[in-house]
Every structure is written in C-alpha cells, then in structure tokens.
Amino acid sequence: MAPSTEPMSKSKRNAHFFKTFTSVAKGKVTLDGENLEDATYFIHSYGKNAKSYSLMWKILLAITIGVVVLLMIKLGNTSEMALRYNEQAQAEFGQWVLAVIGLSFLSLMFFFMGLLMGNRAKAWRALLVSELRKRADGDTPHKSLYESLLRELGA
C-alpha cells in the first residue's frame, strides 16, 4: 500500500489532499498512486465549505445593510445639537460606525474566501476528473469504481 493511501484521520487526509492538489495544479506531481475515493470525498467537502463561505458573506451583507439602516434611523432621530456637543452621542455614533466597518470587513473577507475556495474546488475537480477518465479508459479491475466516481462528480 502506498504511503498516500494508508488510513489517515480526517484532518490529516484533508491536509494531504490540499497539499497534493496544490502541487498537481502547479504541475509538480501527479495523482498516480493516490486513493481517488478519498480525493473525491475531499473535493466534495471542500466544495461544500466554499458554498458555506459564499452563504456566510451574503448573510453578513444583509446584517450590515440592516445595521446601516438602523444607524440612519438613529441618526435621523438624534438632534444636530446632540451630535455636535454631546460626547455620549458622539461615542455611540462612533461605535455604530465601527460596527458597520467590522461587518463590512467580515463580509468582504468571506466573499473573497468563498471566491478563492470555489475557484480552487473547480480547478481541482477538473484535475480529478481528468485523472479518473484516464484511469477509467484503461483496462483496470477498478473501472466501475472510477466510472462511479465520475458520475458522483457530475462528469
């Protein structure tokens, strides 16, 4: 049994395939000798994580918009004199602005992480599909397994 196909814990397997697919994408190594069932599972879980990051930024954006609306309502209900001369009102306004900035930053962070992870998942899926097709075209005893994995990946 090749070292890369020995039983591993989930975190070690994910780290292994992350490193492996990154190297394959750069053209440094190939997927020869890899357990493609585990690789397929990794691609599925990585794709799900990318989708969850995409959902999280949308939720955070909605919350940010809600906070901005509340801030505008609060600003409209506060007198101009209080905003100019009342230190407590100024501090409270500053806290609201910091909350909006923080939520905006988190939204942007999750947006870019989801985008990056989604692009990686697509590229790695394409690499895995090409390897599975190459192995399925050959006359191997695991041909049905490779075809099943291809169907699972939607290829």
Image (cartoon, helix red, strand yellow):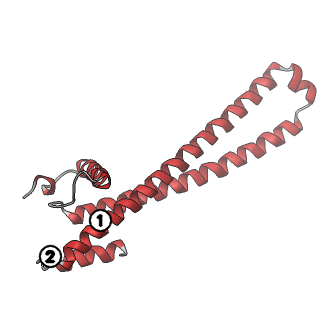
Instruction: Give the residue at the far left of this rendering.
Output: 1
Q: Quadrant of residue 32?
A: bottom left
Residue shown at 31% from the left, 63% from the top: 127
Q: Where is residue 119 in the image (x, y as percent from the top left)?
A: 45, 57
Looking at the image, residue 59 sits to the left or right of residue 150; the answer is right
- Tell me: residue 80, above or below residue 142: above
Decide which of 63, 136 is in the foreground and name it: 136
For the image, the number of numbered tags is: 2
- Tell me: residue 104, above or below residue 114: above
Quickly name the residue at label 1.
Answer: 128
Q: Residues within 10 Å of mark 2 (few under 14, many from 20)?
A: few
- Tell me: residue 123, above or below residue 106: below
Circle 1 — which element? helix
Residue shown at 19% from the left, 80% from the top: 144
Q: Quadrant of residue 108?
A: top right
Residue shown at 12% from the left, 55% from the top: 6
Looking at the image, residue 40 sits to the left or right of residue 74; the answer is left
Q: For marks 2 and 1, give the one nearer the viewer.
A: 1
User: Which mark is on residue 142?
Assistant: 2
Q: Quadrant of residue 94?
A: top right
Circle 2 — which element? loop
Q: What kind of residue is marked 2? A: His
Q: What kind of residue is marked 1? A: Leu
Report the quarter where the N terminus lies.
Answer: bottom left
